[in-house]
Amino acid sequence: MDRTESDATAPSRRDREWDDSPPTDTATATFGLGCFWGPDARFGAMDGVVRTRVGYAGGMTSAPTYHSLGDHTEVVQVVYDPTVVSYDELLEVCWAIHDWGSPAHKRQYRGVVLTHTERQHEAATRQRTALEERAGRSVETMIERLDQFFLAEDYHQKYELRSTPVVGDELAAQYGETFVDSTVIARLNGFVAGHGTPERRAALLETLDLDPQVLAELRRRFRSG
């Protein structure tokens, strides 16, 4: 799909990146890549990702929780704008940020691509095969069709941001029920974890009306991330 804006009046990529109003057409990808906090931050920092959530999937246990996970796996679910970032590009990040060559010591942390459509399944299988051919060894990450996704507890959502002193509580209170699904919050969660360029971090802060103490702490994390 052509990613250029054909309409001269359409918002720029930068405008859309900080916009909490999702585009009309989005797609969803789901990955199990070990502990879900890190992947949540990594994908959240990506241009074209609209929102991220962490949760549990890939098993048969009903109503899993963190302390009663059953046979489920920790996963991150990514809603994205396919005119900005493709599923293949998300897959490339998937392979890069987890140990695909070793079996997980627990099912909770296994590597798995949970596909939503037949096209996703074919793309994941194609990339997995290509990776095995390049590496000359087996890829232990499984490719399965997603059955159901269970949202994880609030304290797991946007963990890097929630664990930032002052910032997490302030933003959770300000955004309320929209905290988990906010594009801005997804970006900040990724940026405080060290992802994204200094230019993108600064550009986002320019758009936010936050308490000076919160902005100062975000800038400190951005520098140390």
Image: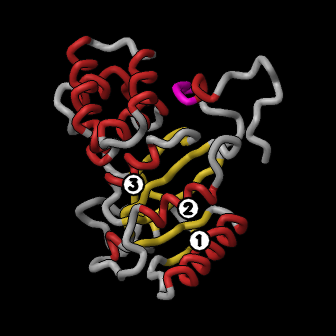
Q: Residues within 10 Å of mark 3 (few under 14, many from 20)?
A: many
Which mark, by number, is residue 39? Answer: 3
Q: Tell me residue 105's x, y (percent).
A: 27, 80
Whether 167 is drawn above or below 105: the answer is: above
The stretch of residues the image draws in magenta is 17-21
Q: Residues within 10 Å of mark 1 (few under 14, many from 20)?
A: some
The answer for how far apart the CA atoms under marks 2 and 1 are is: 15 Å
Q: Are marks 3 and 2 in contact (CB under 8 Å)?
A: no
Amino acid type shown at disc 1: Arg
Disc 1 marks which residue? 145
Q: Tell me residue 22's x, y (percent).
A: 61, 32
**Badge count:** 3
* Residue sitting at x 56%, y 46%: 79
Q: Tell me residue 155's x, y (percent).
A: 26, 44
Q: Dominant secondary structure of the magenta stretch?
A: loop
Amino acid type shown at disc 3: Pro
